[in-house]
Image (cartoon, rainbow, N blue to C red):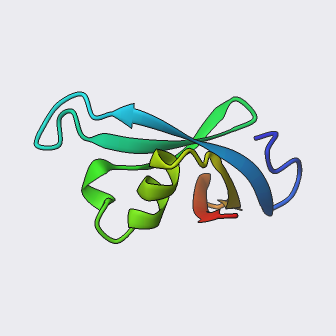
Amino acid sequence: GELLAGRQDADVAAEMVAETTPKGKYKDEPYIRFDAAGMTIGLLPAQYRFGNEAFFEALEAGTKAVRVHLVYFEDTDTFWAKARLE
């Protein structure tokens, strides 16, 4: 999409948004949505809290800004995204 603008990979500014898991085993537990340029570019499900505690703690402390490295694989038309705290 427009986030990569003709490149195979890019480093973009994104925002963490807290959402609540709607159903299943982790119902009512928070998960994190990563948004950039009005698009959701990744999710960190509630079950991944263990191992990604820093993201959840940062969001709970009021931090929203993250950097996300996006890679586009043309042959499979898929994206890979890796977020990091600033």
Residue 28 at x, y = what percent?
Answer: 21, 33
The image quarter in which residue 27 lies:
top left
Give the position of the C terminus as an image quadrant. Answer: bottom right
Left-right relation of 47 to 6: left
Left-right relation of 25 to 81: left
The image quarter in which residue 10 lies:
bottom right
Q: Residue furthest toward the bottom?
A: 51
Residue at the (76%, 50%) spot, across then down? 13
Q: Nearer the viewer, residue 65 or 42?
A: 65
Count numbered badges in the picture.
Answer: 0
Q: Residue furthest toward the front?
A: 61
Residue at the (60%, 59%) spot, across then down? 81
Q: Nearer the viewer, residue 31 or 2?
A: 31
Left-right relation of 80 to 24: right
Residue at the (32%, 41%) spot, across then down? 30
Q: Residue furthest toward the right?
A: 6
Considering only vertical position in the picture, is 42 above or below 71? Answer: above
The image quarter in which residue 16 lies:
top right
Give the position of the N terminus as an image quadrant. Answer: top right
Residue 58 at x, y = what percent?
Answer: 51, 55
Residue at the (34%, 49%) spot, across then down? 45
Q: Nearer the viewer, residue 68 or 20?
A: 20
Residue 46 at x, y = what percent?
Answer: 29, 49
Considering only vertical position in the picture, is 74 above or below 37? Answer: below
